[in-house]
Image (cartoon, rainbow, N blue to C red):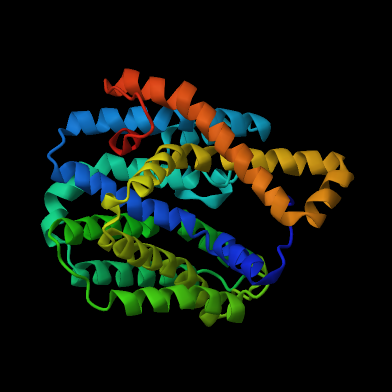
Amino acid sequence: MMFLPHFPGALGTLLWLVVATNFGVPLFLVLSGFLITRQFAYAIPTRKFYRNRLGKIYPTYALAVLIFGGLNSVEEPGIWLLHLAGFQNVAWSISSRVSGHLWSLAVEMQFYLVAPLLFQWGYKLLSSFFVTIIGLVSFAVHGLWVLSLPESQAVRLSALLDVYQFSSFNFIALILGAWLYKLYSENRSWSHVRLIGIVSAIGMPLICALVVPSLRVDEVDLTRVNSVAALLSLVSLAPVASVALTYHVLKINWKKWRIWHSVTSWVAALSYQCYLWHALVLLFFEKTMRYHPELQKLVEENPWISLGIYIVLSVILARITYRWVEAPLHRRISGRRIARMSNLKDAV
């Protein structure tokens, strides 16, 4: 979006790499897989699980769909129905009609539907070998499907955008989170995790530098097999880096640090709402700058201050919707008492 200006220096380059790889989404999915698996490991009743998830996720998700759909003048009933049902990620051309960031929540809600069965039938099978095989098969199947399409830039770009949001592709991150919980709960170590994390973390910016130096995927020659493979590798490395990072964080005895617990609890409570509404702040700036060029000039001249304002406004919106929408509706639907954000269990 226009609001994201050029950020100078190495830190600015790093920021743009994070934006280009969309690192936050796979990290969110890995953490979600971890937390959902923990709930089933603690023998949460299936009915209670569905009520909790419905109360936590859907009310503000539906509100976001209505707001973004209205702002983007969506008129097609089918688009509305797919979004409200949480299945808009079947195609990028559908999900982008309302807002490009809501597809990950469709993946999340679809995972909730099958999570009880996956835990019952698949938890015992989770192992490093099993997860690796599933990941490689997913990579190969999606890659071969894209390459089977006509050697057209537009066709393959559309297909790659579809793959990026397919549940069949993103369930790998959720499964990685479930496997991570199994390692953590059984106090088992992960061999070569440091090497895997380093390779993944270095691989993403390296692929960007070699294949996507402009950080614009539409400028990559997708008629070439190696370009398609490189872009699929780029988005596949993010969940691997995420699970390696989470593994190291879990190995730290952070529970003894009171301030760390307070910070993580606060972030856990607001992270969902921040994700929902940060795009609304971006949309506001984009539309405002379209009619006020002086604001665009101000943003370009003060990129870090603009970024700070964007973060603050996103957090304010998140706090308001958490306090006045999510918490009361979650309490009413799930029957849980959600009194304070300082309770991490209430946040998830």
Q: Quadrant of residue 171?
A: bottom left
- Which residue is painted at 48% across and 55% down in the image? 24
- Which residue is painted at 52% across and 34% down in the image? 318
Horizontal and vertical percent for residue 291? 86, 39
Identify the residue at the far top of this view. Answer: 332
Q: Looking at the image, is 140 positioned above or below residue 81?
A: below
Name the side, left or right, on which 49 lies relative to 62.
left
Horizontal and vertical percent for residue 211? 59, 78
- Which residue is painted at 51% across and 50% down in the image? 91
Horizontal and vertical percent for residue 293? 88, 46
Viewer-side residue, 96 vs 180:
180
Q: Is residue 251 visible?
A: yes
Viewer-side residue, 273 vs 119:
273
Q: Is residue 167 visible?
A: no
Horizontal and vertical percent for residue 125? 13, 61
Name the side, left or right, on which 136 lies relative to 58.
left
- Which residue is painted at 24% across and 66% down in the image? 131
Q: Looking at the image, is 273 positioned above or below residue 231?
A: above
Q: Looking at the image, is 203 positioned above or below residue 243?
A: below
Viewer-side residue, 105 vs 89:
105
